[in-house]
Amino acid sequence: MQSWIRSGRIRSSGTFCTGVALMVATLFSWSSPLAGTPNFTTATAASVDENSITASNIRQTSQLRWIEIDLSEQRLRAWQGKRLVYSYRISGGKRSTPTPIGRFRINSKYRTHRMRGRGYNIPDVPYTMYFYRGYAIHGAYWHNRFGTPVSHGCVNLPVKQARNLYRWASTGTLVVVRK
């Protein structure tokens, strides 16, 4: 490649070098798991050993932002490495419409979003962050029963707390959901 640069076939412009650096960084970020995180894929309760998902084994070596959802406590905790940033009561899924268990990533964010499904059609759901298929962490203005499973599988938060989390988290943030 050095000879190509010297001969003028490839210019050593900032754009070219930046592009190569971004490609390399992207390839390595997709292929390597996060340091210190349990090595299992996004899955449902049937295929994940929930005992292997612990706050300590994720926090020990990672300084990344991540979200822990404990369905037995109906509590969401937001972490930056070992530091607890937020701890909120939630409303997870009812027994008939459970919240999926596993390791996920926030894949899209919407300031407001219409949510529809069997038995519900809610406009302007605030601070919506999808983490698995149609499941999201979001604000809920239509109830105040946080600490009790009442949702259709999503993770409901009071609107002000959902706003804080929405601003703090980014697309790609790790979400660990456990019983």
Image: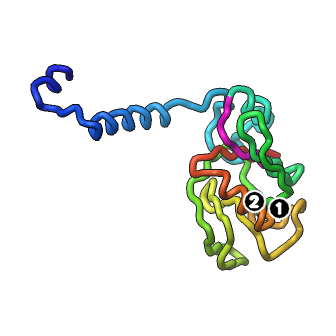
Q: Is residue 63 magenta?
A: yes
* Residue that extends furthest to the top in the rendered view of this protein: 3
Q: Secondary structure at mark 1?
A: loop
Q: Amino acid at mark 1?
A: Ser
Q: Position of residue 30 (x, y in %)?
A: 48, 36
For disc 1, the neighbor class at 10 Å (few under 14, some 14 to 19, many from 20) is: many
- In this picture, which residue range is highlighted in magenta? 62-69
Q: Residue at 89%, 62% (x, y): give it.
A: 148
The answer to whether 171 is drawn above or below residue 80 in the figure is: below
Q: Position of residue 124 (x, y in %)?
A: 65, 76
Q: Residue at position x 62%, y 62% from top?
A: 134
Residue 114 is situated, as x and y percent measured from the top left of the image, at 62, 75
Q: Estimate the x, y position of residue 164 in percent, counting from the top left.
A: 73, 58
Tell me the tag on residue 91.
1
Amino acid at the residue labelled 2: Val
Mark 2 element type: strand
Single out the residue that lies furthest toward the front.
14
Residue 9 part of the magenta segment: no
Quadrant in which residue 1 is drawn: top left
Q: Do the residues bearing badges 1 and 2 touch, measured as CB atoms within 8 Å? A: yes
Query: Main structural element of the magenta stretch: helix, strand or loop?
Result: strand
Q: Disc 2 marks which residue?
A: 155
The answer to whether residue 50 is above or below residue 35 is: below
